[in-house]
């Protein structure tokens, strides 16, 4: 960009700065921002005729070497004078990103900016700041007065010290007149407690009850004081514990569906990859009610844009009002091509996005509406496997790679393409396919349309059969549920949630606190190399612990202080000070810690954290020292037994990979995570660029994607401290309890006295010996032997290579291995030696919503032994031979 060029108002512009090294630090962020400001913004303003400009919208992004652009910060509104605070804000955003970001090879920094004219200045909140989630650190405070609801109350039960006391009714009642005040305490006196009303002119201001801590004690300075929704424990006139009953709403039952909707059609796009860029050359749409399939082939149109526009126009009819349009893998693939087309056809596009995936796009035209959805999010498996499982029409055989040949025209007619253009097709099947065309010419257009048409028919049949089974079993219409997790949750609420079961809806600060305990499964390397290891997996770990264990229910009761001194059978979530024994080789409690980037580790030493009570009790058995600071109490109840039993029985009594088997497995494994969804969901809007400023000024904008004269804006319309949010039906205590129970269950098998564990994932262990038959079987919660490793290398969590009885099994987190693996066992073994490394590359898809295309680039990956979630131990030959827990001192690596 030439700094002297005039900057146009209200137009988003990118400014990229190439990095000399593919590593990003705070210093580089600060220097890049200073250069951007000095050499772009200031000269442009001074020389470009933008003197009326006062404020800017700026977002910090990065680009990796495969061209993928990631947003790092939210959109910031700043003035010319705010450069210094921007540096700190952008650095903070970079700090809190996950380790996946920090391990990326970064090609360049991008500052995306937009100029706002001065006439909009009065709309800008100059001091708008990022709302940070903070942990409240409350300490017991000595008090001489008991302050409550604006009143200074006495901190003793000795009522004669409250003021001038008048006893009556044989000393069972009293009135205390406060000096220099018209307030009075009216007291009813019982054996070990008193009831008090604070009044003015016979009007009651508040009521409370004081009870002796020890029934036969005469210590009137140690007592429990109870108000309507709060309780305090006082010892020696000091508040040592405080309870607050928190009001909350509860997840409600839903009614069964009256009927099953058939208002859906299916669609599929076929693409070709020419020189690393995907483009659409064919679209098919199937109306299952009318039994009509319509195809649109690129050779019949000017370009793919015209072809897709006409395809969408063909269903922009009144008869399809309210219909769902299902595409398999719409959120990750087809939607990239279609969003731009939908934008061209309507001003009313409403996307629902979660984790950068399109859950649904509501598309309005006139008074009518279509909803585009991803059937893969409802049935997450390949179309080929689903067709076999649901016993519907199978996919056609087709050389899908043939169209990638740039020298082949779409009007090709001739000999059948060679076998290498087919995917996963054996020689026998290929010869059978060739027999179909004996004496006939092979026509690319006809065969492509035949293939694509069969896909949309197959998809329709699968969804229709799936809908019928769910309706017959549960009486629910799947049209109300865009994902398998939402459907599983709906099934639980409809059929298995009892009327008297009070699952709390948790948002606001309570959510923020309890979410700190929701740290997921435990994945660790204990020993990096082993031979003849046995890999065991648990049958349905999460459904098993959901069935067997009580869950948090009822309204939460907040408390401050060490509640364990006064209450037994505690159940809830507590902020605690932890001291883990130094000699504990495999610790239990997890802690999110910044080691280059944020990681979840299981350390020893001392720190503070929020944990589920049952996990803390298990930690105490392991000689952890626990001091409770504050937390939330819940009632407990078994709530998932019937749900798990119903679907597990359906699964075990169904033929493997049958529709009932697939459905039962999906629903069993999809429920728990739905409770752990964040209430701080982004909203998304597509609006004209000229009309977008009010959104930037009013909300926290997290991302912007440009279209032709339009912007897809992602934003938060609330602060993370808000207690009441519109997003309902989540309960983080449930999700956290499920994962905590799973960690407790797995801990036993990671620490068997006579059976060393080398590696563990959420629901699996690699052991040196066979498990006792007591723990092995087909039942829920039993282990099954997956494979035996002749030799196994574990470099890091989710980075391993095993030579097994089933063949080589290699996994490298974040890297897509090719069919042959791309790496030999011997090469992997060499990485056990310090400083050895391997350079790998794989194909990376780059999705560009703005352009509506997908390209393929090479991404390079350096594999080496690096510090992970435990400290690495090397021998005298610099070979990685063992690990030990990280040691923390007050939460920092010691």
Image: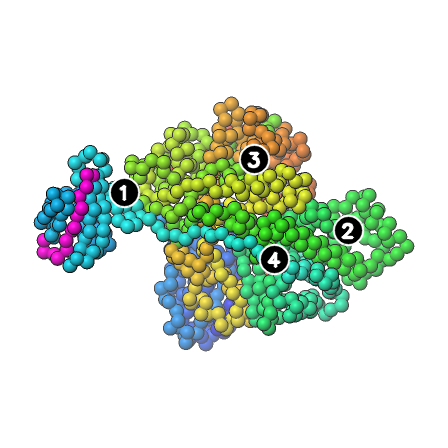
Q: Is disc 3 placed on a helix, strand or loop?
A: loop
Q: Which residue is mark 4?
A: 259
Which marked residue is nearer to the observer: mark 1 or mark 4?
A: 4
Q: Which residues lie in the magenta part?
A: 179-192
Which marked residue is nearer to the observer: mark 2 or mark 3?
A: 3
In the rendered view, tell whether residue 890 sits above or below residue 507: above
Which marked residue is nearer to the observer: mark 3 or mark 4?
A: 4
Which residue is located at x 49 percent, y 61 percent?
683
- Disc number at residue 241? 1
In the image, 149 versus 6, the foreground residue is 149
In the image, 202 versus 68, the foreground residue is 202
Question: Which of marks 3 and 2 precedes in the sequence?
Answer: 2
Q: Is residue 259 left or right of residue 591?
A: right
Question: Which of marks 1 and 2 precedes in the sequence?
Answer: 1
- How would you rate the neighbour count of disc 3 (Cα within 10 Å): few for under 14, some for 14-19, many for 20 or more? some
Which residue is located at x 48 percent, y 70 percent?
692
Which residue is located at x 35 percent, y 40 percent?
576
Distance (Cα) linking label 2 and label 3: 39 Å
Q: Position of residue 440 (x, y in %)?
A: 88, 56
Q: Which residue is mark 3?
A: 780
Distance (Cα) linking label 2 and label 4: 37 Å
Q: Is disc 2 placed on a helix, strand or loop?
A: loop
Q: Is disc 4 placed on a helix, strand or loop?
A: loop
């Amino acid at each position: 960009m030439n700094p002297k060029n005039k900057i146009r108002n209200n137009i988003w512009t990118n400014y990229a700065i190439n990095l000399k090294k593919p590593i990003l630090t705070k210093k580089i962020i600060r220097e890049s921002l200073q250069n951007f400001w000095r050499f772009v913004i200031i000269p442009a303003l001074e020389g470009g005729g933008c003197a009326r400009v006062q404020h800017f919208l700026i977002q910090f992004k990065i680009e990796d070497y495969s061209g993928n652009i990631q947003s790092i910060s939210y959109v910031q509104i700043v003035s010319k004078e705010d450069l210094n605070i921007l540096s700190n804000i952008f650095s903070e955003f970079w700090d809190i990103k996950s380790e996946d970001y920090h391990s990326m090879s970064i090609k360049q920094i991008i500052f995306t900016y937009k100029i706002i004219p001065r006439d909009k200045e009065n709309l800008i909140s100059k001091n708008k700041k990022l709302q940070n989630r903070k942990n409240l650190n409350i300490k017991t405070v000595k008090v001489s007065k008991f302050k409550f609801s604006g009143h200074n109350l006495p901190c003793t039960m000795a009522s004669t010290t409250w003021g001038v006391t008048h006893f009556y009714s044989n000393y069972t009642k009293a009135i205390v007149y406060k000096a220099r005040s018209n307030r009075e305490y009216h007291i009813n006196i019982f054996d070990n407690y008193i009831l008090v009303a604070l009044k003015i002119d016979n009007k009651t201001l508040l009521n409370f009850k004081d009870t002796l801590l020890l029934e036969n004690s005469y210590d009137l300075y140690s007592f429990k004081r109870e108000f309507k929704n709060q309780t305090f424990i006082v010892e020696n006139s000091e508040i040592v514990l405080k309870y607050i009953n928190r009001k909350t709403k509860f997840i409600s039952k839903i009614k069964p569906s009256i009927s099953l909707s058939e208002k859906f059609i299916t669609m599929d796009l076929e693409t070709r990859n020419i020189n690393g860029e995907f483009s659409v050359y064919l679209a098919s749409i199937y109306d299952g009610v009318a039994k009509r399939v319509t195809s649109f082939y690129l050779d019949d149109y000017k370009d793919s844009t015209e072809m897709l526009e006409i395809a969408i126009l063909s269903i922009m009819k009144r008869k399809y009002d309210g219909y769902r349009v299902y595409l398999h893998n719409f959120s990750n693939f087809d939607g990239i091509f279609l969003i731009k087309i939908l934008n061209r056809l309507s001003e009313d596009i409403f996307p629902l996005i979660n984790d950068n995936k399109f859950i649904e796009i509501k598309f309005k035209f006139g008074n009518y509406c279509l909803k585009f959805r991803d059937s893969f999010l409802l049935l997450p498996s390949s179309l080929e496997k689903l067709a076999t499982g649901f016993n519907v029409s199978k996919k056609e055989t087709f050389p899908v790679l043939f169209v990638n040949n740039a020298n082949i025209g779409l009007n090709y007619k001739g000999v059948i393409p060679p076998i290498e253009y087919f995917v996963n097709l054996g020689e026998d099947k290929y010869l059978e396919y060739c027999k179909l065309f004996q004496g006939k010419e092979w026509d690319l257009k006809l065969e492509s349309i035949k293939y694509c048409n069969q896909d949309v028919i197959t998809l329709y049949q699968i969804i229709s059969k799936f809908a019928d089974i769910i309706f017959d079993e549960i009486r629910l219409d799947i049209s109300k549920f865009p994902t398998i997790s939402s459907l599983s949750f709906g099934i639980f609420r409809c059929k298995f949630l009892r009327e008297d079961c009070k699952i709390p809806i948790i948002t606001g600060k309570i959510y923020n606190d309890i979410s700190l305990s929701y740290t997921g499964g435990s994945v660790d390397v204990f020993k990096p190399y082993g031979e003849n290891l046995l890999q065991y997996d648990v049958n349905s770990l999460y459904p098993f612990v959901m069935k067997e264990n009580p869950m948090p229910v009822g309204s939460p009761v907040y408390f401050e202080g060490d509640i364990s001194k006064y209450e037994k059978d505690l159940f809830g979530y507590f902020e605690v000070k932890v001291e883990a024994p130094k000699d504990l080789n495999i610790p239990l409690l997890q802690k999110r810690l910044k080691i280059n980037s944020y990681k979840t580790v299981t350390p020893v030493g001392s720190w503070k954290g929020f944990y589920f009570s049952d996990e803390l009790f298990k930690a105490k058995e392991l000689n952890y020292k626990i001091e409770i600071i504050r937390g939330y109490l819940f009632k407990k109840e078994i709530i998932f037994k019937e749900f798990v039993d119903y679907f597990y029985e359906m699964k075990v009594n169904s033929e493997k990979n049958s529709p009932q088997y697939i459905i039962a497995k999906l629903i069993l494994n999809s429920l728990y995570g739905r409770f752990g969804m964040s209430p701080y969901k982004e909203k998304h809007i597509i609006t004209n660029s000229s009309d977008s400023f009010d959104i930037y000024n009013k909300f926290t904008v997290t991302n912007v994607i440009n279209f032709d004269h339009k912007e897809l804006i992602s934003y938060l319309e609330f602060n993370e401290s808000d207690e009441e949010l519109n997003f309902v039906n989540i309960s983080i205590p449930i999700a956290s309890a499920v994962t905590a129970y799973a960690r407790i269950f797995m801990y036993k098998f990671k620490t068997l006295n006579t059976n060393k564990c080398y590696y563990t994932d959420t629901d699996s262990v690699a052991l040196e010996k066979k498990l006792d038959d007591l723990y092995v079987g087909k039942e829920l919660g039993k282990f099954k032997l997956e494979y035996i490793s002749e030799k196994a290398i574990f470099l890091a969590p989710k980075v391993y290579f095993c030579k097994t009885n089933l063949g080589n099994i290699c996994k490298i987190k974040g890297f897509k291995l090719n069919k042959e693996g791309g790496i030999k066992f011997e090469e992997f073994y060499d990485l056990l030696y310090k400083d050895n490394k391997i350079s790998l590359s794989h194909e990376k898809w780059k999705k560009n919503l703005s352009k509506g295309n997908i390209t393929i680039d090479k991404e390079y990956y350096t594999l080496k032994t690096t510090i992970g979630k435990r400290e690495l131990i090397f021998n005298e030959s610099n070979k990685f031979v063992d690990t030990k827990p990280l040691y923390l001192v007050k939460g920092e690596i010691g």
